[in-house]
Image (spheres, rainbow, N blue to C red):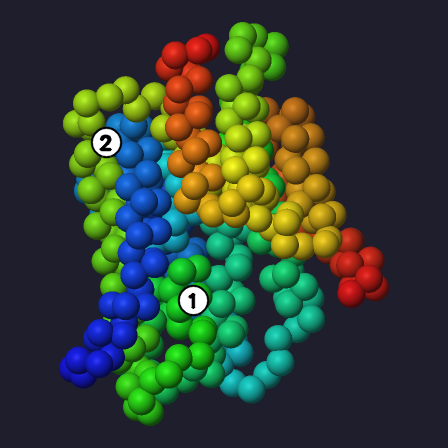
Amino acid sequence: MSRSVLKKAIKDTFPVLTGYLVIGLSFGIVLSSRGYGPLWAAGSSLFIYAGTMQFVAVELMYSGASLLTTALTTLAVNMRHLFYGLSMIERYRDTGKAKPYLIFGLTDETFSLVCAPTALEPGKEKLYYFLVTLFDQLYWVLGSVLGCALGSVLPFNTKGIDFALTALFVSVVTEQWLSSDDHVPVLMSIGISVLCRLIFGADQFLIPAIVLIWLGLTLYRKRAEGKA
Amino acid sequence: MMHSVLIIAVAAVVTVALRFLPFALFGGKRETPPYIQYLGRVLPCAVMGMLVIYCLRNINFTASPFGVPELIACAVVVGLHIWKRSSILSILGGTACYVLLVQFVF
């Protein structure tokens, strides 16, 4: 183990440490407010290990959604990971035994660290990628288990704390709105979702909405690419 | 209980499959199909819009409080985000606002 690589990995993952602890804590608290204990937090964070989807999974679990709804929702929510993978094919080509774990742990935040060009001694990249991936998951598991354990003993009323999830998505949509000029995809998806919610009801609208959004985006492709 | 375990398992398997698929398909030298590249660009934004509606699905506009706490708190998130563009601040601020509204006002 090279100490310089270890130090660099700890230093580079520090922003992820703060972010993951805060979001992991809120995830844990939401989970406990729905009646699930720390073991559920650990299982979700170890095996799913995709923040947004874990929040959504709590709702799916709580409302007893079907496994088909779960699979399609996961597909839609985590589709972006396909593109992280595509960008990491070259960098992860010769990572040997660590490769499966590196791919498994490629979250948004880990991707943002490993895709950046780093000043590393040649031959040390593999260890660096591994440590960054491992530390990030440790922070996340720690935050979510802690939040879940604290959630049930917190001395104040946690009613309303599950709004953290809504707030997370609203902030992402706002950020995307501010940083993109093409607002048609997001407007289309909000419109279709509202319509499907009205037609199919609160518990049945996700699947039709996902299918219609996918169709709508496919039809919109010619115009979007004509503009670009 | 058992169903919740299955939901976690399905979400985990689909997530892992999505993360491994590009390495399995395009680990060689082939170029990514343009349609897939296009979906990669537009789908993330679109899905987030859908998830906002998913989170707000249980609002009842025909009975008190008519979704007012949710709408106010969403506006706070948008406002904070336009102001500082820090997701942690937007999330904490919006959630704190919602907690106060549902516990003390409505």
Q: Is residue A60 left or right of residue A11?
A: right
Residue B57 visible, this angle? no
Above or below, A134 relative to A197 = below
**Residue B72: which disc?**
none
Q: Nearer the viewer, residue B72 or A142?
A: B72
Residue at the (53%, 57%) spot, across then down: A79
Q: Position of residue B41 (x, y in %)?
A: 63, 61
The kind of residue on which mark 1 rests is Phe
| Label placed on residue A151 | 2
Q: Is residue A120 above or below residue A44?
A: below
- Three-letter residue code for mark 2: Gly
Distance between the alpha carbons at the discs numbered 2 and 1? 30 Å
Kindly tell me whether residue A124 is visible in this rendering: yes
Residue A43: image x %, image y %?
Answer: 25, 48
| Label 2 with label 1: CB-CB less than 8 Å | no
Q: Quadrant of the C terminus of chain A?
A: bottom right
Residue at image mark 1: A111
- Which chain hosts label 2? A
The residue sitting at the bottom extreme is A122
Q: Nearer the viewer, residue A70 or A105?
A: A105
Q: Residue at x 38, y 56 (%)?
A: B13
Q: Residue at x 70, y 41 (%)?
A: A187
Helix or strand or loop: what does disc 1 sit on?
Answer: helix
